[in-house]
Amino acid sequence: MVVVYALIVTSGLITAAIANPITDDGFVYDLGKCFALVGIALLTMQFVLSARLQWVERPFGLDAVFRYHKMMAGLTAGVLLMHPVLLALGGGGLGLIYSMDAPWYIWFGRVALVLLLAEVVGSAFRARLRLEFERWRLLHNQATLIFGLGAIHARVIGGDFEVEAMKVLWVTMVAVAAGAWLHHKLLVPAVARARSYRVVEIERETPNVWTLKLKPPPGRARFDYRPGQFHFLHFRRGRGLPSEEHPFTISSSPTGEHLTSTIKESGDFTRTIGLTSVGDAVAIRGPFGRFSYTYYRDRRDIVMIAGGIGITPLMSMLRHMRAWPVEAEVLLLYGNRTEEDIVFWEELQEMTRRGCPRLKVAHILSQPGESWTGERGYVDRAAIERLVGGPYSDKMYYICGPPPMMDKVIRDLKTLGVADDHVEFERFSL
């Protein structure tokens, strides 16, 4: 897959080298054109990476694909930014960059580059800029305009595109980008709306955590998934409530009849989750992700480490283990602030009593009440040493929680000699 990606990104260079190997331009100017060819190919592939194509994400997990997409966005902007700079330094003159008398097709390129830089900066510093999700999404949706302006600019001004093979390549890139966008934005959402699930039950787990049980439309089977995976839910509730799409973990086991997601009130949208009513429609896209013990089954004992609402994918796995017992022993280290914040408290107790799976649970509270007799503090190296015990390297670790907690736990496990391939986690953010 990586080799295919590299070949696509360099396809413009390869085609130009074969079709038009000799030019009258200097090295720096030619280098500037090469940067443009690579940049437009990178921009094309950004549409593919963001389209949630399951055959693309399945080998890696959507969280990894999206992180790569974000990293490539910075590279794409840098490559395309160097394009006019190198052309100017290679003989085109600085007027190419700042002249107000430039032809319209030059302005198309300039506007596309400015919009691209704004999009990359907005995404990279979204938290610092306090950019709300929906505003960020609107900013992100200008990608089609960026690509359109850039593609027209390249076709009109690019001398290499006079060669027939390059014309075919240009049409192919436009078709790939347009196809990925149409699939992601129009086709799949339309199908998901037509096959909307319905909310059949709402359960309050804690004061700010809710579980929604979802049922497919009559005559359609629930989609299959692996325990620990997630999906995108697009609520269409009416009543003045926001209609937005967000990713949520599937907290149910695929052995069950219904589909559930357990959602914490943590943002502008999720604060309205408790206002959802039975019968509300929910369009679903999924499943996604590789955070599931079923991908890595062996006889090693399992240590699950959760922080707050990060328990949901681990609960899906535990529920699956209850239906399909595993040989391994399972230890769950579950960190929360207070006893009131513990999700699935009673069900976890019932699992430990029944011994299926062979589960031990250690609740660790950072702000316990006076009556709390369990573990206190944080899920850190000291807690791991105290509760897991060595040897640490012969166990599998599944971690889900707030990013700072996950980062620290992963570092702690490395210092304890745990190999990277014994640690699985999902770091998902849009």
Image (tube, rainbow, N blue to C red):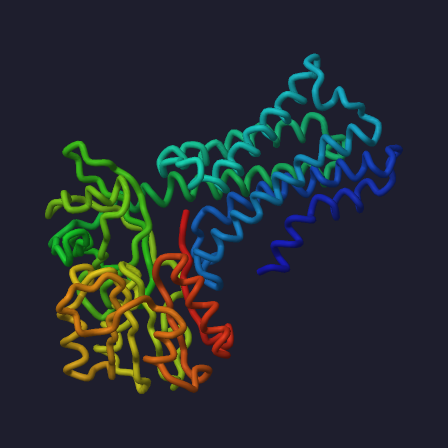
Q: Quadrant of the N terminus?
A: bottom right
Q: Is residue 324 above or below residue 153?
A: below
- Toward the viewer: 330 or 83? 330
Q: Nearer the viewer, residue 241 or 215?
A: 241
Judge left or right: residue 292 versus residue 205: right
Q: Which picture quadrant has residue 41?
A: top right
Total tally of numbered discs in the picture: 0
Residue drawn at x 44%, y 60% as measured from the top left: 61
Taking the image as shown, residue 164 lies to the left or right of residue 202, namely right
Above or below residue 229? Residue 87 is above
Q: Quadrant of residue 133?
A: top left
Residue occupying the point 44% across, 39% down: 128
- Residue that protrudes farthest toward the top in the picture: 101
Position of residue 20 measured from the top left corner of the image (x, y, whole percent): 82, 40
Q: Is residue 107 visible?
A: yes
Residue 38, percent across and down?
68, 43
Provide residue 201's location: percent of width, then percent of height: 11, 54
Residue drawn at x 70%, y 16% is 102
> Can residue 343 be seen in the rendering of this structure?
no
70 on left or right of 89? left
Nearest the viewer among 118 and 113 is 118
Q: Residue furthest front?
A: 370
Q: Position of residue 65 (x, y in %)?
A: 49, 55
Left or right: residue 274 compared with residue 83: left
At x 14% / y 53%, what residue is drawn?
207
- Camera-side residue: 128 or 394? 128
